[in-house]
Image (cartoon, rainbow, N blue to C red):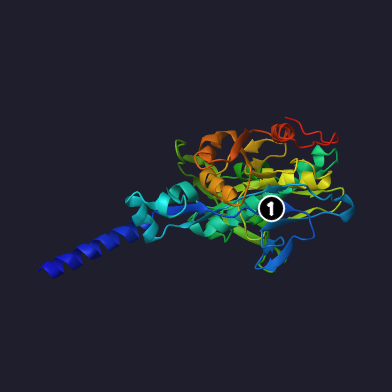
Amino acid sequence: MAVFVTVAVIVAVGGYVLHGAGEYYAISPGTAPTVSASPDCKSVGGGNWALPGGRPCVRIDIPASKSAPVDGSIMMVDVLEGPATPWEFALAKLGLLHSLEGATVLYPKQAILGGSPASQLGCQQTQQMQGAQSAASVVALRALGYKVAEKALGAQVVEVVPGTPAAEAGMECNDLITEVDGRPTPTSDALAAAIAGLTPGSPAVITVSRVASNGSTRVLVLHAKLTSAPAEGSTPADPHKAFLGVATQTDSSFSYPFPVSIDVGAIGGPSAGLALTLGLLDSLTHGQLTGGRRIAATGTISLDGAVGDVGGVAQKAVAVRNAGAQYFFVPVQELAAARSEAKGMKVYAVSTLAQALSDLEALGGSIPKSVVAKA
């Protein structure tokens, strides 16, 4: 009898651990690649780049005539994110996860995914990184006085809500919606206005541009039957409002004064914006932005130069500290989280690019007179 009881207990505990792990995502310290325009930052396969000695890097490509050798370094940083394992869940329940797994923490699945299906997370993180790369390039160039024109291309699908007219019509994350019933939708607001002009139950012909895995683009015409808007959060259902079932953002193209591109490999998410901006500025000027110091940075960057909050900053502090960073620039909202794992590393809280540049100057960096970044 005792054997059967023991087996039953083991099965019950195992089932509890397996089920519990499925409700969480694990966030762990990742890598801290150097942002570099140096030809020494070379591909090492698998979408990864490295400097001599194997140090990971993110490759900036700009004309050689525009690039300056850099004294010091600017590092971006990522975290490792994925569904929690049963082992991680068990350690978390025992209060041992943080100490035994290098500052790893668990977050409820809902906190990571929001309302999106897990299958769309990769698409969203790729979009966010592409947005960070574009914003960093635009902000850096404009800070140097260059004019960068912007053209809206369409409403880019960030999320397709399951079971909605958009999902039933075959719409996918990253589709670019350019027309609704022949009406152009160059922006996310234009799409919202086009749908608002229709009635629940009516059909809608939606033109989308879709990029295939091989990089080719094709235009598709999708047919959706709109429903009425369901209740969402504190907003009640509206039987008179047409509903498609997508979340979108405006996708834009930018006209740079000379070729600029950034290759981050397989890293996703929006948090590299500030680091990429600083790294590009350093390479495009005299390379003295850091005063020879090893600077790490995390935070989103908006086209107006504002620095926004990100996630996993405590784990990022571990990653950049392990990579040898002397100073870590973080969004103001996450100063406490960064300091919790900084140990001897100095942490600076910033809310704008201008503030970050001012702090770099105070550390001995040289900010070129041509930089016109505004708070």
Helix or strand or loop: what does disc 1 sit on? strand
Amino acid of disc 1: Thr
Choose top left, top right, bottom left or bottom right for residue 142. Answer: top right
Residue 282 visible to an observer of this rendering: yes
Q: Position of residue 39 (x, y in %)?
A: 80, 60
Residue 243 visible to an observer of this rendering: no
Choose top left, top right, bottom left or bottom right for residue 364. Answer: top right
Choose top left, top right, bottom left or bottom right for residue 310. Answer: top right
Q: Position of residue 32 (x, y in %)?
A: 62, 52
**Going by the image, does 137 lie left or right of 331?**
right
**Going by the image, does 42 lie left or right of 272?**
right
Q: Position of residue 283 (x, y in %)?
A: 80, 48
- Say which of 121 and 46 sits in front: 46
**Going by the image, does 364 lie left or right of 191?**
right
Q: Is residue 153 above or below residue 349?
A: below
Q: Tell me the residue at 39%/54% (across/down).
A: 23
Q: Residue furthest top?
A: 375
**Going by the image, does 7 lie left or right of 105?**
left
Circle 1 is placed at which residue position?
34
